Image (cartoon, rainbow, N blue to C red):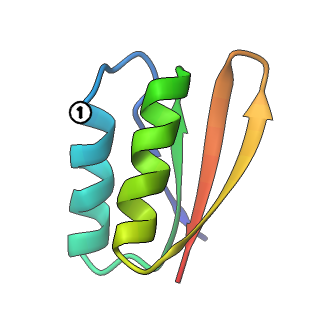
């Protein structure tokens, strides 16, 4: 079961900080939930900078970013 980082409603840089924390903890498969486009773009950039993959699923006004190694 992959873990989840719920960053909905948080403004940057908080979603990126939480994503970085998950990566530093050694998680290789997890989801990040965000509620705005800017956070989505920043989290994707963070994930890619850490040599990981990011797949985005749009769910209404929210985005689920599926992170994997």
Please give left or right for residue 25 compared with residue 62 in the image: left
In terms of depth relative to the viewer, which is nearer, 27 or 12? 12
In terms of depth relative to the viewer, which is nearer, 26 or 58? 58
Q: Which residue is mark 1?
A: 14
Q: Position of residue 65 (x, y in %)?
A: 60, 50
Which residue shows up at 64% across the image and 42% down it? 64
Crowding near pointer 1: few (<14 within 10 Å), some, many (20+)?
some
In the image, residue 29 sits, relative to residue 8, either above or below, namely below
Which residue shows up at 34% across the image and 74% down it? 50
Q: Position of residue 56 (x, y in %)?
A: 70, 49
In the image, residue 29 sits, relative to residue 38, either above or below, namely below
The quadrant of the picture occupied by the N terminus is bottom right
In the image, residue 32 sits, relative to residue 25, either above or below, namely above
Q: Position of residue 61 (x, y in %)?
A: 69, 15
Give SS at disc 1. helix
Please give left or right for residue 56 compared with residue 68 in the image: right
Please give left or right for residue 37 compared with residue 16 in the image: right
Please give left or right for residue 51 compared with residue 18 in the image: right
In the image, residue 68 sits, relative to residue 44, either above or below, namely below
Which residue shows up at 38% across the image and 76% down it? 27
């Amino acid at each position: 079961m992959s873990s989840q980082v719920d960053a909905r409603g948080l403004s940057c840089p908080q979603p990126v900080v939480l994503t970085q924390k998950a990566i530093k903890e050694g998680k290789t498969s997890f989801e990040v939930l965000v509620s705005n486009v800017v956070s989505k773009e920043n989290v994707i950039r963070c994930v890619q900078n850490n040599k990981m993959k990011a797949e985005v699923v749009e769910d209404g006004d929210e985005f689920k970013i599926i992170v994997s190694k």
